[in-house]
Amino acid sequence: MRRVVVTGIGLLTPIGSGKDEFWRALVAGKCGIAPVASFDTSAFPVHKGAEVKDFTPESYFRKRSPQEMGRGSQLAIAAARMALQDSGLDDAVYDKGRVGVSMGTTSGEPQIVERYNDIRKSAGLESIPKEMPPRYPCHVIPSNVAIELDLHGPCLMIPTACAAGNYAIGYGFDMIRTERADLILGGGADPFSRITYMGFARLGAIAPDRCQPFDKNRQGMIPGEGAAILVLEALDAALARSAHIYAEILGYGVSCDSHHMTAAHPQGEGAMRAMASAMRESGVSLKDVDYISAHGTGTPTNDRVESLAVRRLFGECADKVPMSSIKSMIGHTMGAASAIEAAACALSIETGIVPPTINYEVPDPECDLDYVPNQARRVDPRVVLNNAYAFGGNNASLCMARCEA
Amino acid sequence: MSARIVATGTGVISSLAAGIEAFETALYAGYTGIGPKTLFADSVPLGAAGEIRNFAPQQWLGSKGLRVLDRSARLLCVAAHLALESSGLSAQVAADASPDFGLVCGTMFGSVHSIASFDWSGLTEGPNLVNPMEFPNTVINSPAGQAAIKHRLRGVNSTISAGLVSGIYAIHYAMEFLRFGRAQALLAGGVEELCEESYLSCRKAGIISPHDRIRPFAHERDGTVLGEGSALWVLETDECAFRRGAKPFLEVCGFGSSHDAHSIDTFNVRAVGATSAIRLALQAAGVGQDAIGFIIANASGSPAGDAMEAHALQKVFGARLRDIPICAPKAAFGESLGASGALLAVTAGIALQKKLVPPTAGFESCEAGLRLSSSPQPFEGDYALVNCFGCDGNNAALVLRSVDGEQT
């Protein structure tokens, strides 16, 4: 089977867009959390969010108008355009029939449903513009990317909620190594959503002020938005065109808790299985893992269970593996989260630096790992694991490494 | 990566019937499940649909834990129950809760009704009064997650959205996972519920027949009628099936897909992507077009969509097309969106086993050059083609082979 590498990165996040700006902010420990601007939160008990600022979708569109689609599609197209540009590919390299799009999301285009309800409330169902509802179903996001960039290969959305980015990158990896495709734009996108915000607020899961993963006094997650796309292609082809290679995808593992829709398995059983199968498939052992990009939402339960799962699986090795959560800086960008985190992993592999967990102040005896508190660190990681967990008990861990050709 | 993937069980629920035997009987009798729509009559009166009337999931699932499941989750749980039973795996899955069993579910809208209702409740009663128990139903992977809990499926649990071709993509995704040895057996197919939001979306997009009639490939066709349901196969490698003494009834031998990338809401009249998807599926199966004994068509009564499909079939089969029996089963259960691909595949599986192509319900007339079945038709050979095309440009096709209890 062919080896698969990452040769391009495009992303839009609450701390900056484009890999250079994003990476500078991430290493500096910049925080992208601010009062929510997308909608009025006065009726909510919490008011902070992590939104993408200063996004001008027009600059990424050549063929169609951003007004013809929802914000999820706009973010995805922008990330895809950036990623392709970053990869240095020109049109002539691949047969378009073998270039595809594999994306993940939690909510797809939730803002369409929100506008639907707004209009329904103010003017009635008949006033809903006819072009609006068809923009809702989440598969339109990868299809819009395919249309804008003229890609004719496999095209799908894997809406496995907050772990979706890893599932989507994993599918792209599978397609390329089995030669069913030559290039896949793999990643995730989620726009800021009133529905998501309301749900997490009602569950009491949103922190009032900041996100403090693994800290004893952590108060919850901060909902966010964003998109990331990785250009995935076969190693041989990347070498042949002298492409810049960020990292290699070694494998991934998925599992289902089959326990509870919203709460993780208390012993981290599913999380352990996902990490273990990712490592098994990648042919790496516990000792090989140099860094873990945590799911690390900042909720009391997630961080405790994820720490426990790593501790149980890695045993003593756990003390030697730094694990940080960039959600402390960019919030929880839902279906985009693990795609953005995979991009961060690729950049860690390239630069040797791993990003910090910011706002870390008081250690929690139930979270007893090295969380790279507050300062980025030089680790020179060779092998990294990217964890992602979701509603529905969906777990996915992706294993990436420095590419030694 | 070359393991053969076989089906050893089927679960199906649609407006036509629930359960594989009842579904088969109704299909070959030429019945249709389409009738007056009764769901969401308060907000959208009138209209026809392939609606599952008097849906009583407790007859299969018991009543425990049903209350929190939305319609999509209930439909999927019923199909999963039926599929596991039919494959003879129910007892083993329930007893072992092994991480080797999983579910891959295609859907187009998810439960957009659960999503919109949750938001509506926040909008009208205030965000502090929404029912937190309903929040989990707002994620698109909720039906698959609920079915995993209900049936103790701890392996891969993926939800796939590729619009109208979601069900076919889900089957392909499961095949890949089985070939990588990531699971022993996977339930694979799709689910879609009929609800106000998806119905209005399709009506406003102009794809629903103004006469509430679904007439695939007919000259007078003027749109489709929506349906709902869930269909799942139990898929495994032939080696796994052999080891546990299961009798596979078909092999899924080829998947093909292609995106037209030309428009988000119109079929490509040149049928470039559709043709390519069919050719890729044949190529993956390692057979030529001459091996295909019959075709299960995507045709949903869409003027442009059916014309595109006919054009693609002409390009692939040429002069031979007039001799190949074609069935358009959406006439029997309606355009079931993300569940359609799986319902079409399940129909093809039944026809392969029965060695008879089912009739197209309500057949009256048909475009020239197509042999659309008006009554049950015999066919030659062991291979079937299943087409599935979406107006967002996504096209997919499957090639299936009858194995008829043989040890493959």
Image: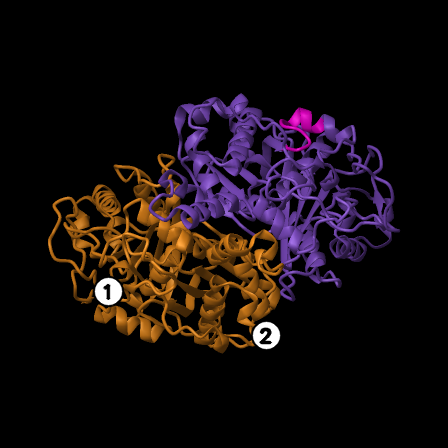
Foreground pick, B357 / B299? B299
Mark 1 secondary-structure assignment:
strand
The three-letter code of the residue at mark 1 reads: Val
| Residue A63 tag number | 2
Give the quadrant of residue B332.
Answer: top right
The three-letter code of the residue at mark 2 reads: Lys
The chain letter of the purple chain reads: B
The chain letter of the orange chain reads: A
Residue at 32% across, 64% down? A344
Residue B371: say if magenta: no
Residue B17: say if magenta: yes
Determine whether, in the image, residue A119 is placed left or right of residue B257: left
Q: CA distance from mark 2 to mark 1?
A: 38 Å
| Residue A354 tag number | 1
Chain ID, mark 2: A
Q: Position of residue A309 (x, y in %)?
A: 25, 43
Q: Magenta stretch: give its range.
A: B14-24
- Note whether residue A291 is visible: yes
Between disc 2 and disc 1, the foreground one is 2
Give the quadrant of residue B250.
Answer: top right
Mark 2 secondary-structure assignment:
loop
Q: Quick one: which residue is furthest to the front in this view? A: A123
Q: Position of residue B27 (x, y in %)?
A: 74, 31
